[in-house]
Image (cartoon, rainbow, N blue to C red):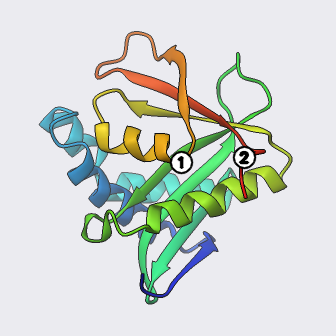
Amino acid sequence: MEDYAVERAKPGDEQTLAYIQTESWKSAFRGILSEEELIRCTHVDRVTAMYKRELDNGIGYGYILRVNGAPHCIAWWNATREQDMPGYAELICIHSLPGNWRKGYGSKMMDAVLRDMATAGYRKVMLWVFEANDRARKFYEAMGFATHGKVKPNLTPAEICYERYLEEVK
């Protein structure tokens, strides 16, 4: 594995965050989302504006993993948005540029994020993943997540909830 570093995202990082998210979505969700939905969700200016709002307003916790100094992976988390899951942290996203998939950087990012959640006092974490996203589901399961049983109602494609305890974080 090449040199890598995980750092907290800060105001001014919104373009990097948006670029990694949109490029990841273009590869990861092709065949899961319709072409029209994929184009709509990967509009880089809109995603940049979203991250700028989040960073400027201190909403959530964002991270950038750099490989040899170049941005490769992002993650974002906050307290859960699910009313029936109080006390959970929520992994809102974790995305990597496709050129370095399956090299261990996503696991390094996940480890850092889970440690920060536990340090912040959370004992459980949840996330949503497209049911058809087998690659991501295998990744989450390898990281100790299991299905919770919740499915987002009336959403196509279906999203399912995964969870894990943070006491397991080393």
Q: Is residue 107 left or right of residue 18?
A: right
Foreground pick, 153 / 98: 98
- In the rendered image, is residue 58 in sight? no
Q: Residue at x 33, y 63 (%)?
A: 102
What amino acid is at disc 1?
Met
Foreground pick, 64 / 145: 145
State the separation of the CA atoms marked 2 and 1.
Answer: 10 Å
Q: Where, by quadrant of the figure, is residue 12 drawn?
A: bottom right
Q: Position of residue 115 (x, y in %)?
A: 73, 58
Q: Is residue 133 left or right of residue 84?
A: left
Q: Position of residue 68 (x, y in %)?
A: 43, 89
**Residue under numbered circle 1:** 143
Q: Secondary structure at mark 1?
A: loop
What amino acid is at disc 2?
Glu
Q: Secondary structure at mark 2?
A: loop
Foreground pick, 39 / 96: 96
Q: Is residue 131 above or below residue 117?
A: above
